[in-house]
Amino acid sequence: MGSEDTRWLNEREQNLWQIIREFIWQFPSAMDRQLSQDSAMQSGEYSVLAVLSESKETSLRPAEVANELRWDRSRLSHLLRRMEAKGLITRCSDTLDRRGHQIGLSEQGWQAIREAAPLHVQFVRESLFDSLTPAEHAALETALPKILAAITPREPESVPAD
Amino acid sequence: MGSEDTRWLNEREQNLWQIIREFIWQFPSAMDRQLSQDSAMQSGEYSVLAVLSESKETSLRPAEVANELRWDRSRLSHLLRRMEAKGLITRCSDTLDRRGHQIGLSEQGWQAIREAAPLHVQFVRESLFDSLTPAEHAALETALPKILAAITPREPESVPAD
DNA sequence: ACGAGATGATTGATGTGTCAACAACTTTGA
DNA sequence: TCAAAGTTGTTGACACATCAATCATCTCGT
């Protein structure tokens, strides 16, 4: 198990690894830049507003939002506190399950997402779609889920416990 | 310029966008998990150690490291302070340009990167290379730089000023 | 009906990234 | 030689993510 057995990356592999690292780093930071410049908003806030605005319900519970975004509850809780302070969302306690709350968009929140969405979609379209061919889209659609599958800690597959 | 003109994403596009978002989010977090579990190290620290260990020089200036990693100087400075406190790197003032310092690997830093590298390479190999076909590697190698080019704020291209 | 354990959500401590301001030094150009 | 401008690096304030601990409430089995 020593490092003599390590299969180091060859030059081609190093090259691709470098590209992926840059992509992983640059893309989110470019997206954050776009959102904060165009809409004075952080990408997390946008995500939350988007989930709320796309929901059929007028309000959601934090757990539903967290689940949709695959986020930690704690992270969401901190963010919701800040967003409520900014007046983007409203919170009221859930009458059915009194542990939880109902989170909804305030009028200001609606306005914020309405204003931000077109510019954000434009950024996504220009950076991802206009710059690639349909074949390249298809390639990403195939390759990335394979990588995701490889890094996802495999769960017990809902196999009966014995 | 109103939102009526916005070309919203169709279903296929939304699907790909969702995949990319998940990839961008999951991959770095899986990588951080691997590094912190296997090597009690954060990805930024690993990057710095890797740059220093791969360099032909025995020490580098922060600007060179920052340039190599395409990082903010400030970010690097904060990280170097923490790494020096942990004993991973050494710092001494540069005699030629006394604004700067020379950053080098301590013995402990060498040991840390030697121990961490095999496991980290294994993670990268398993998640990126073993899970994809050569054709898929090639596709990523083509597509991702195009996206990077689309999001990089174009600079004046070293065109003479008039 | 009741207690044990599960679940929803928050909080505080801590580590890290970002931004703007700054200090120290070097370079440039007259 | 000297002042202006540029470069290198640090710092402090702040925003955000993560982790463990905690509290309130619900659910389930008895």
Image: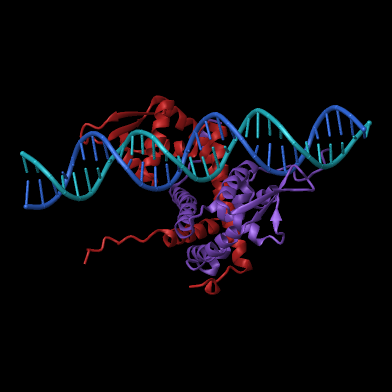
Chain colours: A purple, B red, C blue, D cyan
* Rendered view: A158 above or below A27: above
Task: Say whether residue A144 is visible.
Answer: no
Task: Say whether residue B79 is visible.
Answer: yes
Left or right? Give the position of B96 relative to B50. left
* Rendered view: B125 above or below A47: above
Identify the residue at image location x=40%, y=58%. B152
Left or right? Give the position of D9 relative to A84. left
Determine which quarter of the picture holds residue B108: top left
The quarter of the image holding the N terminus of chain A is top right
Residue B13 placement (x, y as % from top left): 59, 66
Q: Nearer the viewer, residue B17 or A6?
A: B17
Identify the residue at image location x=64%, y=52%. A90
Determine which quarter of the picture holds residue B18: bottom right
Residue A70 placement (x, y as % from top left): 64, 49
Residue D20 placement (x, y as % from top left): 63, 29
Residue B132 placement (x, y as % from top left): 57, 53
The quarter of the image holding the C terminus of chain A is top right
* Rendered view: A76 above or below A31: above
Label count reads: 0
Q: Nearer the viewer, residue B86 or B60?
A: B86
Identify the residue at image location x=64%, y=60%. A53
